[in-house]
Image: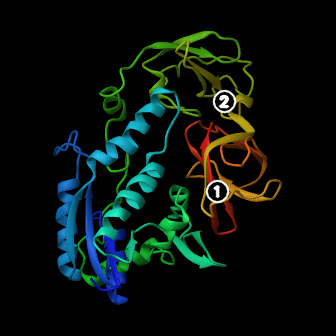
Amino acid sequence: MSEKTVVVGLSGGVDSSVAALLLKRQGWKVIGLFMKNWEDDDSEDYCSSRQDLIDVMSVADVIGIDVEVVNFAAEYRERVFAEFLAEYQAGRTPNPDVLCNSEIKFKAFLEHAMKLGAERIATGHYAGVREFNGEYQLLKAEDGTKDQSYFLYRLNQAQLAKTLFPLADLYKREVRKIAEAEGLHVAAKKDSTGICFIGERPFKDFLARYLPPKQGEIRRLDDGKVLGKHDGLMYHTLGQRKGLHIGGLKEKGQPGGGEHDAWFVAGKDMDKNVLYVVQGHDHPALLNSTVVAEQLSWIAGRAPQTHWVYTAKPRYRTSDQPCEIERFDSEPRGNTCEIHFAEAQWALTPGQSVVLYESRVCLGGGVIR
C-alpha cells in the first residue's frame, strides 16, 4: 500500500460516508471498514446492521473505494458491554459511547487498520485534531450542536497522531448537501441513536435479559416516607422524572417543591434497594457545586493544573460550565480529582463523564464518582 492510505470507519450513515468522500477527493487511497460488533439479538426487529452494510456497499460503489467487513463482537462484549453491565449493576449510569470510542473505534479498529498498512484512520465524528507545540490536541467541532469531543476525551497522543476527522470544520447541513450533490442515497438518512453499536432497544426489557430486576421501595428523601415501588434500581438515574409511577402523590411543604411539582430521582441505596425521590426540579438534593471524578484520562498524557479556570461538561447535552480543579487525591496525579463549578449543577450523575476544556481544546476528564 502507498503511504497515503487511510482506513475510514464506515457505519452506513451520512457522516462517515462524506468523511470517506472528502478524503478520496484529497488524494488519499481510501479503504472502508465496516465493523460488526453486536450479535446477541441480530434480528430484523432491532438490528439495522444488515441495512447499514448494504448502505456502506452502495456508498463505496459510488465513491469508488474498497470495503472490508470486520467482526469485533468479542472485543465489544469483553471491553465495552461487560463494563456497561457492571456499572448498571453498581447503581451508576454509564456512557457506552465513551468506551466504544476508546476501546473499539480507536483501539481494535486502529490496530486492524495499521495491520492493513494504513498511515491513518478516519471517522465521521464531529471533532478536530491538530498538532501544536509537538503535541496532538483534540478540538471541538465547528458545528457546536454536533460536537462529539465529549465522547472522545479518553483518546491519547498515539491515537490522535494516527487519526483524521474530515468533518471538523463542517456543519451537519453542509455534510448532507455534499452527500446529496454526490448522489449518495444516505444523504437524508436518519442519525443512529441508542446504545453504541447495539442501537435502539426497549431499554428495560433489554437490560433485564442480562441483569435480573429486583423490586424495592421508593422513598421520599426528606423524611423516608414510602411512596411506591420500583422495578429495579438499574432502571433509574439521577434527575429522572418519567417512569416513577408516583405522579398522583402531590404533597405540600416539601423543600424545593410545591403541591403540584413533579418527582425526581435523587439517590439510590444499593444495600437496602431503596430509590430516593424529591419533589421539585430545584430541590437542593439535586444541586451540587462539587464533583469527584475518577478513572482520569488526560489527552496530553499529564494532568492540567489546579486552581485554573476551565470549562467542563458534566453530561453531553449541557453547555460548557466554568470550573476549576480543586485538588488531586493521589500522588502522582492520576486517580481522582475534585472539580468545583462556579454555579451549582443539576443532577450530577455517577457513571457519567465530566469532560474538561480550555477554549476549544478538550483536555480530558473522568467518570463522576
Q: Is residue 216 above or below residue 27?
A: above
The answer to which of 5 and 238 lies nearer the viewer is 5
Residue drawn at point x = 17 percent, y = 55 percent: 50
Q: Which residue is mark 2?
A: 280
Residue 231: image location, x then y, percent: 42, 19
Of the residues shown, which amino acid type is indicated by label 1?
Ser
Q: Secondary structure at mark 1?
A: loop
Locate residue 290: give its quadrant: top right
Residue 254: image location, x then y, percent: 72, 20
List the single residue furthest toward the right: 307
Q: Of marks 1 and 2, which one's residue comes earlier in the chain?
A: 2
* Image quadrant occupied by the N terminus: bottom left
The answer to which of 369 and 176 lies nearer the viewer is 369
Is 341 left or right of 21, judged from the image as shown?
right
Residue 317: image location, x then y, percent: 56, 52
Q: Which residue is mark 1?
A: 319
Residue 337 visible in the displayed image: yes
Of the residues shown, which amino acid type is indicated by label 2?
Gly
Q: Is residue 127 above or below residue 197?
A: below
Q: Secondary structure at mark 2?
A: loop
Residue drawn at point x = 53 percent, y = 22 percent: 247
Is 324 left or right of 128, judged from the image as shown?
right
